[in-house]
């Protein structure tokens, strides 16, 4: 198992290219190559690092193999930028000739990377990005998502806020496809008044102007979708402005998981959020995952880590089902769709468009038995919930 | 019959002056041969992927050479050159969105749009000098960047994915890396030879003279602003051509191609190669991008190495890589 | 839009402008006196933020972190000047661009190597973590008030330094006419080092103060560097007064843009188009402002050079 992008492996390969040129054609099924293209620098870095670490832990649990074949993971940084990501994806597909790709965090990057991946007939197992385009009108047989469709977690909070009886909500999300999907999903289930709705640039870090407007709008609840580092800044500034006294803060699990908690701490107590997974879920797979993640990495896993873990488990199951024959794409697709593996969230099944059908839970940030500030699961919001776009998908042939 | 016809002095070609840039025959021929043979060589080593990388490097060499025309030879330090790259790229991208993918239509159109924008830029900026010129060109490029970010119909911040490459007809398929490489090479060579001819012609001399001493040229009766404007227009349209090729190579167009950091990168390439030197843009682009490529396979901290090399070059060479070893010119 | 909201947004603009001033002051001095384009200025800001964050984390005290970080960055700046930048003074601007760009790349990577690629944590001190009641109905984050206070204090200190001290006199002389200052016996070497160290210290103050609000991460300097250049061009290269006025202008215009333009756009073209057009317009506003100022005053607001 090699985890180093552009490492010695590439140089040695180039030097020995002349000798191995003849032999190269025969090595197809000796191992599984995975291209892990994720955001490892910049504000979104925490998310990509978690996906990578979760994935690697699953590999470790499987003894460095996927479906019985030795696995080689080539890690690369997309820097959160669609154009840099596309270049790197091209390299992974054409130069390294990976068998699977995974890892992209942000939907705008995913939409740029999708085409070269699908054109090269490589399967993409998304451990995070779940754009509505790939769930509906642009669905593709090579795309699978083990996490959720972007709208789902927001739909769950929308329903929660509606059920809790809040009347006026202020909304905030970044100005990119997932941000648009987020607020659309929230509004699908929240039927009250939207006091204000703002989209900020993905790299904006100072929310002073937006906070002032929120205060002026008179909302009694605030719903934000600000993944990773963006959420950290917002929540610090939100509490610093004293708005947490007058307004209840809601967010999807992305804006309220361990990475944000670690940077913000106590001021986050009382924030509600939704998720398809929580670290206090009691099934044996999850308990092992959480315990080993803490042991190996010294921190509690986030939902991103759980998704990376499941992506590897899915690949493991699929490769085992096709008995290591990665060239029969139709059989491989069937195996992936069957999803015969135990997820950290219990049972797992795919919808016909390659997105999951699963339960969603409500969590709140509180102190646990050990006094740590962390999430606690309160209840179920949706059972066997599918995404809203599956009906639009006419899956093309392989 | 005995005919001893001596060649009179006036028939001999004039010796190259300070403003001339003769093409070094043998090195240039060798370089051309090497570039022609590159895809075959890479194929033999099983590294076909790098043909695409080579195309990308050539495209940036073209862009850097176009910048060198105004920066090195014209003395106009434009911090907004990447805007032209973006213009050319978006011309191709937007036309493709509307179903037009013919290279014969898109690429000349890119040249035209680039020229028009350069004319506009010149009309606004050429009134200023020095650091103010730099900042105004920067401002214009940034404005264009933010404009493209806000246009959602053309992708906005996320950019446009191109369905394929421009179609050239003539039985040539640009989707093949090899064909694309030779097309880019042909265009780059044509532009380069054209620039070389231009620099040795009266216009080129006048441009360089304006760089040296603008007030004197104005006093001598040269239409200084017009000369600079022509140079800027030519430079902009060539950069737009590079942008059109870049859109094809990357299969992707996004506003970030036009950011000031990209303009800075182009400037660095020219400065690295040698400002005002014939091969300055080419050498700078090749050196910069090869360094990036090679260093990133060695370590993930490659920017440290790149920075160190750039720093060494600036401290040791008086004017870029092409001046290494040369005596320092008197100011 | 109530009067209180206007007041709140004005304070935001003031805060942002004052922080820009800290950066622009150092940049304009270096450009004005040493005639050097320093692209690594943003890197000093970043280093300052990282050092403040690290010392705060290690010592548990924000104040110690701020003080220590500023001193450390000033020292680093002086060291940088003595070793590398000194050789670039005599070179042309383009060589300076290349050299300082190289330093920018190296410092970004060095920061990534030492502290990792993810943003690191820096929080405001507990005493300033909440809001203060300024007027009935207007409460404003205490920390932002603190930034405004520090910004104003530094501006005053710089003013006193430049107008009332010997060093300041030499700085002004050097900015106005370097050859004459040299001829008059100013110890140029020491002056340059002092100016550069001062600029680095100012960067660190800005970085350390903005750290708790914005993320502390590699590459944080580039974004703000371009704004600093716009500020000094508006203000006039070499003039601290110009840097202050330019920074306040840019800060207020930028915040006003972000606050008002979305409203205006929504009113004019509807919510959907406004959500994409408004941020773009707000960003372009700064450049339009610069173009406008240069049109009427091509040398900036307070030109210093003869």
Image: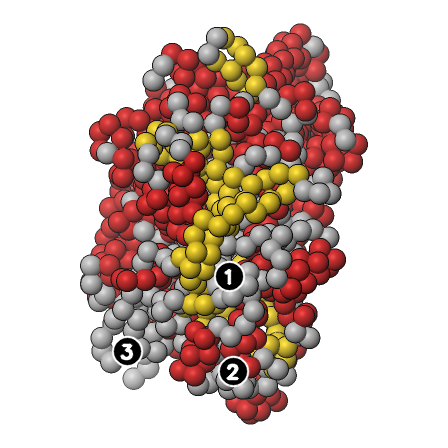
Q: Which residue is labeled 1 in the image?
A: A127
Task: From the top left corner, tell me how far across and down residue C159 is, in percent.
Answer: 61, 11
Under tag 1, what secondary structure?
loop
Query: What is the C-alpha distance between the residues marked 3 and 2?
Result: 43 Å
Q: Is residue A221 something that shows in the picture?
A: yes
Q: Earlier in the sequence, mark 1 or mark 2?
A: 1
Query: What is the C-alpha distance between the residues marked 3 and 1?
Result: 40 Å
Q: Which residue is labeled 3 in the image?
A: B172
Q: Nearer the viewer, residue A148 or C98?
A: A148
Q: Which residue is labeled 2 in the image?
A: A321
Query: What is the C-alpha distance between the residues marked 1 and 2?
Result: 21 Å
Circle 3/circle 2 CB separation < 8 Å:
no
Q: Nearer the viewer, residue B86 or B157?
A: B157
**Residue C304, above or below A277:** above
Q: Nearer the viewer, residue C61 or B75?
A: C61
Residue found 60% across the figure and 77% down from its top: A66
Task: From the top left corner, tell me how far across and down residue B61 is, in percent.
Answer: 44, 60
């Amino acid at each position: 198992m090699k985890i180093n992008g552009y490492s010695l492996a590439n140089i040695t390969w180039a030097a020995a290219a002349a000798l191995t040129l003849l032999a190269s054609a025969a090595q197809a099924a000796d191992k599984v190559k995975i291209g892990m293209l994720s955001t490892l620098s910049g504000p979104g870095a925490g998310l990509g690092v978690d996906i990578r670490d979760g994935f690697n832990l699953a590999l470790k649990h499987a003894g460095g193999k996927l479906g019985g074949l030795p696995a080689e993971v080539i890690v690369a940084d997309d820097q959160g930028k669609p154009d840099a990501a596309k270049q790197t994806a091209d390299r992974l597909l054409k130069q390294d000739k990976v068998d699977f790709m995974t890892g992209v965090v942000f939907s705008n990057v995913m939409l740029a990377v999708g085409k070269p991946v699908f054109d090269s007939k490589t399967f993409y197992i998304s451990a995070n990005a779940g754009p509505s385009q790939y769930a509906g009108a642009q669905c593709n047989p090579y795309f699978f998502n083990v996490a959720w469709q972007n709208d789902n977690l927001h739909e769950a909070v929308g329903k929660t806020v509606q059920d809790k009886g809040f009347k006026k909500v202020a909304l905030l999300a970044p100005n990119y496809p997932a941000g648009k999907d987020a607020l659309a999903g929230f509004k699908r289930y929240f039927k009250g008044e939207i006091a204000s709705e703002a989209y900020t640039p993905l790299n904006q870090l100072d929310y002073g102007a937006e906070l002032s407007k929120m205060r002026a709008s008179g909302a009694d609840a605030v719903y934000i979708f600000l993944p990773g580092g963006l959420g950290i800044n917002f929540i610090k500034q939100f509490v610093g402005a004293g708005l947490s006294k007058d307004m209840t803060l809601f967010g999807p699990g992305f804006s309220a998981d361990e990475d944000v908690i670690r940077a913000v701490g106590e001021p986050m107590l009382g924030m509600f959020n939704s998720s398809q997974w929580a670290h206090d879920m009691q099934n044996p797979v999850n308990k092992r995952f959480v315990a080993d993640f803490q042991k190996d990495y010294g921190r509690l896993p986030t939902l991103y880590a759980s998704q990376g873990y499941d992506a590897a488990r899915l690949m493991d199951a699929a490769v085992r089902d096709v008995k290591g024959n990665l060239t029969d794409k139709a059989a491989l697709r069937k195996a992936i769709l069957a999803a015969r593996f135990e997820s950290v969230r219990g049972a797992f099944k795919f919808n016909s468009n390659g997105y999951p059908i699963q339960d969603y839970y409500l969590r709140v940030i509180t102190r646990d038995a050990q006094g740590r500030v962390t999430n606690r699961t309160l209840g179920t919001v949706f059972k066997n919930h599918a995404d809203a776009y599956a009906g639009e998908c006419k899956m093309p042939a392989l | 019959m005995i005919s001893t016809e001596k060649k009179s002095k006036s028939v001999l070609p004039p010796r190259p002056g300070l403003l001339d840039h003769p093409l070094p025959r043998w090195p240039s021929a060798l370089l051309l041969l090497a570039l022609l043979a590159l895809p075959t060589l890479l194929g033999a080593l099983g590294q076909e992927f790098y043909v695409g990388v080579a195309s990308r490097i050539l495209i940036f060499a073209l862009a850097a050479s176009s910048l060198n025309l105004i920066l090195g030879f014209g003395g106009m330090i434009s911090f907004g050159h990447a805007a032209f790259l973006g213009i050319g790229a978006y011309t191709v991208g937007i036309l493709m969105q509307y179903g037009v993918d013919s290279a014969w239509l898109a690429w000349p159109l890119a040249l035209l749009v680039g020229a028009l924008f350069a004319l506009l830029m010149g009309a606004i900026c050429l009134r200023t000098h020095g650091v103010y010129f730099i900042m105004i060109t920067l401002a214009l490029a940034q404005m264009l960047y933010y404009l493209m970010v806000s246009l959602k119909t053309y992708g906005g911040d996320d950019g446009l994915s191109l369905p394929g490459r421009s179609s050239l007809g003539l039985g040539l398929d640009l989707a093949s890396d090899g064909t694309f490489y030779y097309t880019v090479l042909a265009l780059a060579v044509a532009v380069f030879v054209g620039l070389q001819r231009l620099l040795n012609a009266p216009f080129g001399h006048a441009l360089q003279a304006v760089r040296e001493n603008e007030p004197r040229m104005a006093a001598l009766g040269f239409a200084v602003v017009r000369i600079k404007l022509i140079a800027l227009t030519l430079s902009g349209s060539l950069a737009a051509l590079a942008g059109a090729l870049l859109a094809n190579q990357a299969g992707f167009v996004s506003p970030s191609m036009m950011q000031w950091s990209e303009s800075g990168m182009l400037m660095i390439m020219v400065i690295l190669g040698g400002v005002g030197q014939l091969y300055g843009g080419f050498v700078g682009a090749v050196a910069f991008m090869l360094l990036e490529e090679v260093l990133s396979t060695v370590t993930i901290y490659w920017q440290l190495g790149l920075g160190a090399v750039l720093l060494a070059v600036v401290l040791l060479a008086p004017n870029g890589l092409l001046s290494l070893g040369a005596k320092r010119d008197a100011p | 839009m109530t009067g209180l909201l206007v007041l709140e947004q004005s304070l935001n603009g003031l805060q942002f402008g004052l922080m820009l001033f800290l950066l622009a002051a150092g940049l304009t001095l270096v450009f004005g006196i040493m005639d050097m384009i320093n692209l690594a200025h943003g890197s000093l800001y970043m280093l300052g933020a990282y050092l403040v964050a690290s010392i705060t984390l290690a010592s548990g005290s924000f104040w110690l972190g701020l003080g220590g970080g500023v001193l450390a960055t000033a020292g680093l700046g002086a060291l940088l000047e003595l070793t590398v930048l000194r050789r670039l003074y005599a070179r042309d601007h383009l060589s300076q661009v290349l050299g300082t760009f190289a330093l920018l790349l190296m410092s970004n990577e060095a920061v990534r190597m030492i502290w990792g690629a993810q943003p690191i944590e820096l929080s405001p001190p507990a005493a300033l973590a909440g809001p203060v009641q300024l007027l009935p109905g207007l409460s404003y984050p205490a920390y932002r008030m603190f930034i405004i206070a520090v910004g104003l204090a530094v501006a005053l200190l710089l003013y006193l330094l430049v107008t009332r001290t010997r060093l300041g006199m030499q700085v002004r002389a050097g900015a106005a006419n370097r050859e004459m200052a040299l001829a008059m016996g100013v110890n140029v070497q020491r002056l340059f080092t002092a100016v550069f160290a001062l600029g680095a210290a100012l960067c660190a103050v800005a970085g350390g103060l903005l750290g708790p609000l914005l993320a502390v991460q590699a590459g944080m300097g580039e974004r703000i560097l371009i704004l600093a250049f716009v500020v000094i061009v508006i203000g006039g290269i070499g003039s601290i007064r110009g840097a202050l006025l330019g920074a306040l202008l840019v800060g207020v215009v930028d915040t006003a843009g972000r606050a008002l333009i979305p409203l205006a756009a929504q009113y004019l073209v509807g919510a959907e188009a406004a959500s994409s057009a408004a941020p773009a317009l707000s960003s372009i506003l700064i450049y339009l402002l610069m173009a406008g100022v240069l049109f009427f005053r091509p040398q900036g607001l307070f030109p210093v050079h003869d």
